[in-house]
Amino acid sequence: MRRSIMKRLLLPIVVLALIVPEWVCAQATLPKAASAGGQALSERLGQLFESYYEDRLVLFPLEATLNGDHRYDDRLANDISDEHRRREAALVDRYSGELSQIDLDGLNGPDQLSYDILKSDLARMRDGLKFPEHWLAVGRMDDLPTTFARLGSGSDIQPFKTVRDYERFLGRVRDFPVWVDTGIANMRKGMASGVVQPRVIMKQSVAQMEGLLVRHVQKSVFYRPIQNMPADFSGEDRVRLTQAYTKAIRSQIMPAYRRLTTFVRQEYLPKCRDTVGLSALPDGGKWYEHLVQFYTTTDLTPDQIFDLGISEVARITREMEALKAKEGFTGDLTAFAKHVGQTAVAFRTKDDLIGAYNQLRAKVEPNLPGLFGRLPMSTYEIRPVEGFCEATSSSQMVPAAPDGSRPAIFYVNAAGIEKNPMFVSETLFLHEAVPGHHLQLAIAFGQKDLPKFRRFGWYDAYGEGWALYAEGLGADLGCYRDAGQRLEYLASEMFRARRLVVDTGLHVKGWTRGQALKYLLETPGFTEAEATLEVDRYIGMPGQALSYKCGQLKIMALRAKAQKALGERFDIRSFHDELLRDGGLPLDILEAKMDRWIGAPPTP
């Protein structure tokens, strides 16, 4: 799933209606206090949670836009400034202090869960502020220069439906040069302190930013909202907005990108490092350990994760070999992948590929009620990734607006399809759409009784772990009927397992980019282009790739525990509903919640 703003934002998703009433066993997990004192404490805590959420939106206005809250659509926080980081620290201190004054003995079950989550969130925020991430302002796949182009293109989370919408974005345009100049100053501080990006990442980043520079305003992605202006705008507004956007692109947006790209080309790139691991930076080892804990929400060490990856690669390899033997193929796995791939239907245009994904959608969705008691009514669209960010963006799901004004979008990266035909990936669809990200997040944030910081919360290990687990449900949803798709599913799991090895290998064990590429290419059916995109992602976003497997393995372990404990009483629909109904959770909190559910299971 796309992490389109920054890892420290709690990624918000659409609030969706559900097709079934509240699950009758919704309170089976945790008992509720009924005393008057308990009610007063619950109200006090609810006010604290609401206040925290509102204070976050002031600090992170893009988070509000993602949530469908348009009060801050005209603001772009200078979130890499020292002042902003001080305000973040003050937010953590304030609410940590507030939580410390709560009488835990008086909390009811749901409030205890919210308390534990917020306490965990604040601790991770505090730990993150110890490291100079703001000195590496540019170079991630989701950095602000890339995100800002998405916002301004008119096809992302920034609304462009009313005159007021158009005027609000001009406010963000006003703030963008301030962010850029702060980024340049910060990167200079990083250069002086030895905290700089790998050269290989910055070469790609600056090339992508340079692609946004145009001579003619009408060719800019930021001019698209003008070209797609709603027909009901008055002639006066059309002229006024066209002039305002033309001026903004010429005098604010393009100069800011030009300053940034010139700085990177002339000053920053020569000072970038040839190493690729985070441990090469001052205090980089501790920094990486923090990111591992942040993304996995576990206490696993990098060495333990590396060993886990080796073990999982061996297990999945055995499954691949068993499939190969079943098909009667005698060559190696690479040859087997080529063999089964010969029967797959290849597509040479983006329209044809998107059409094929819509056909897959029609096959999968009727089978969902067999696995889930709750299903979202809201829909989603399937589109190709925008051309200006194809080089660095993976296929991804972008959530809908809570008010229904913007649909969820499953973006498929179809870069170069005209020269290199592409196949439909059942595992990709299951991961990004249903029953993966779209279904999980829609259900989670349909819970209107949850505090907003939870309803719109995001944890990579839970969210990506669920999506990888969802790939394993494919056989029950009409998928993996041929050896090619079955092998593709195993290969998908395999490269997530290899991520555990590659990410830790790069960032703590001194692996080179070449070593990482070679190791990842051992995944059957994986191309060099795919491996290059993946490895560079791990270099630019240390630790994030660990979340998938760590989350999936935890969910699988919880399912096995429930099946063993409940025996014939185990119901897969009830298990999935319970796993999903409280929204995203850190893995340790998820495990404690599910253990309580196993101890008080619903009546079959």
Image (cartoon, helix red, strand yellow):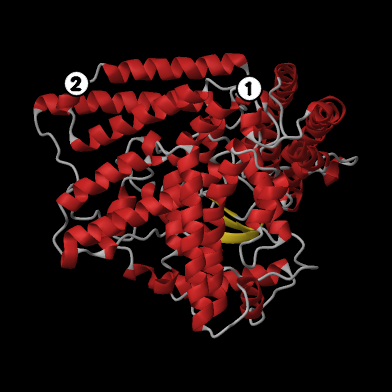
Based on the displayed image, in which of its 4 quarters is residue 113 positioned? top left
In the rendered image, the vertical position of residue 381 relative to residue 130, given as above or below: below
Q: Position of residue 160 (x, y in %)?
A: 64, 43
Q: Nearer the viewer, residue 309 or 591?
A: 309
What secondary structure is marked by label 1?
loop
> Quick check: can you spot residue 366?
no
Q: Residue at x 77, y 29 (%)?
A: 272
Q: Quadrant of the C terminus?
A: bottom left
Number of disc labels? 2
Residue to which mark 1 is pinned: 282
Q: Nearer the viewer, residue 188 or 573?
A: 188
Of labels 2 and 1, the one closer to you: 1
> Quick check: can you spot residue 322?
yes
Outermost residue to the right: 215
Q: Nearer the viewer, residue 178 or 8?
A: 8
At label 1, which amino acid type do we have?
A: Pro
Q: Residue at x 29, y 45 (%)?
A: 591
What secondary structure is marked by label 2?
loop
Q: Residue at x 41, y 25 (%)?
A: 123
In the picture provided, is 571 more to the left or to the right than 378?
left
In the rendered image, the vertical position of residue 91 relative to residue 372, given as above or below: above
Residue to which mark 2 is pinned: 103
In the picture provided, is 40 more to the left or to the right than 11?
left
Q: Specify the label residue 4 is tagged with.
A: none
Residues at marks 2 and 1, CA–CA distance in whole angstroms: 41 Å
Based on the displayed image, in which of its 4 quarters is residue 475 positioned? bottom left
In the picture provided, is 426 more to the left or to the right than 147?
left
Q: Position of residue 210 (x, y in %)?
A: 83, 39
Outermost residue to the left: 35
At label 2, which amino acid type do we have?
A: Asp
Disc on the earlier residue, 2 or 1: 2
Q: Position of residue 420 (x, y in %)?
A: 76, 68
